[in-house]
Image: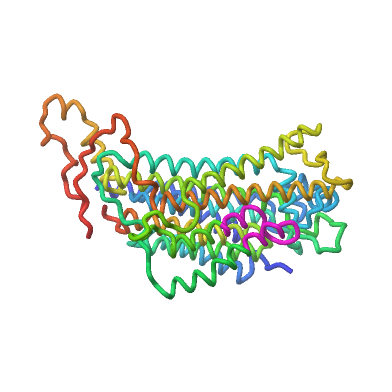
Amino acid sequence: MKARLRAAAAALILGGLFVGLLAGVRDLPPIGDPSSPASTHVSPRFIEEARRETGALNMVTAVLADYRGYDTLGETAVIFAAGLGAFVILAASIGGPRRETPGPGLSHRVDSLLLDTAARVLAPFLLLFAVYVLVHGHVSPGGGFQGGVLFGLGLVTLRLVWGPPRPDRAASRFGPGVRASFLLASAGLLAYIAIGIAAMAFGGAFLDYGVLPLGQDPAHVRELATLGVEAAVFVAVSGTVAVLFETIAVGVAETGRPLPNEDPAPVEAREEG
Amino acid sequence: MTPYALAAALFTLGLGGMVLLPNLVRKLLAMNVMQVAVIVFFIALATKDGGRVPILEPGETEAIAADFMNPLPHTLMLTAIVVSVATTGLALGLLIRIWRQYGSLDERILLSRLRGSGDDATRHGAGDDATRHGAGEPPR
Amino acid sequence: MMLDPGGLIATGLLATMLVTGAVALLVNDLLVAAALFGVFSFAAAAWFAALGAVDVAFTEACVGGALTTILLVAATFRTTRRLDR
């Protein structure tokens, strides 16, 4: 009875929310209206001036890495922090009294000719395409984030097929481990900040690329600096992807100190069904 | 109207899933659905009738604002997608940690186990383990 | 040239999103749910591309269709795919 009441209340509230949202969007300007407020205030300047001011044909790249570079810096910091957070959460849980046998993770080597061949064919193109996406981000869809994720996925592909330690060669594994991935991720974030500070050193504001002494044409200078920023994002994102995969899929180093005051929790052993 | 309506439907679906479903992985999926609903809304907002993809041809230097989709919501949503994967990764780390610690990803089982082990007075004071409800019950 | 946001293909993609999203939340197996979430993300990416947001579509395809799904499957392997525990 209580459960049925709760379900009815939930349906009522959610239905009310849905109807409210529908009523709310009715007052918005129609979809595709070029004179809607969202399309007439800030963005016309981005559309009309991006080519002249930043040299980028892709306006999304221009806005992302140049006009809103500070925003992108914060975002890079957020994903770095997420990778760090996932690592810390999982690393801290290891080493104490192990009451759960975690699932095997994806750390078993699979000796499959099919997978091995597929990875050999796929991975080089994936990695190369990631770099292409990065450097072509000015003139086509793409940029640091997409390229970074693709590069990270290429590393993950190799890591899945070849990666884990084999019994005969305990230390061998392909791809960056957690430590190297963290180095990559933090190097990317620090490079981004360094570009911002370099602009300050040459008399501009933070992340004001135009003042960097890279050439005569300010648009070209900003184009180069935008590429630098995108490369920094690329490195940071691919490092973070590798960190997330290592911690979530494979598991971090199985050594560590138990957390102080860790409560010996009362969970019974899990029986696998 | 249609994209807005479907964004509203997806948002309701995601919110309802987050609140009502007891399994934590399902909650996480519902959160992702909700995020995509918001992205759908913003992208629908960015369209213009007869607008082009916001990328110039190589030879083009002049652009008229009415001819191009609005790049600003695109940028914002690109950011949102990347942040959403960071959120998902962190949440999955937490879920694995919860699974290791408590052996369950179901909200109801977790709550009963938390109540069972968090009751320190019962456990240490009376020393009566049998009074800890929930801790020993089979998970199904 | 852009698809009409209210046109058949765009609406069909949105309907696909709605169906796969709902089924992903309700299906009885978390591995299937992860796979369906991949389909959901891919439909979303296709819809974004159809509406001219190519960069967003690219990102959604990389991130939602590939990375998030991989992480979900991996986490499912390390925990459980069943719902009753």
Camera-side residue: A47 or A108?
Answer: A108
Identity of the residue drawn at 30% across and 56% down = C83
In the displayed structure image, the side of residue A265 where residue B57 appears, left or right: right
Between A194 and A139, the one lying in front of the other is: A194
Residue B77 locus on image (x, y percent): 62, 51
In this picture, is B71 found above or below A198? below
Residue B29 point in image, percent of width and height: 43, 54
Q: In the rendered structure, which segment of residues is drawn in magenta?
A: A129-151
Q: Main secondary structure of the magenta part?
A: helix
Residue B101: x and y in percent read: 29, 42
Q: What residue occupies the far front of the structure in this picture? A: A168
Residue at 38 percent of width and 50 percent of height: A251
Q: Residue furthest right?
A: A216
Q: Is residue A169 above or below residue A100?
A: below
Residue C64 in the image: x percent, y percent?
Answer: 52, 58
Q: Does residue A16 show up?
A: no
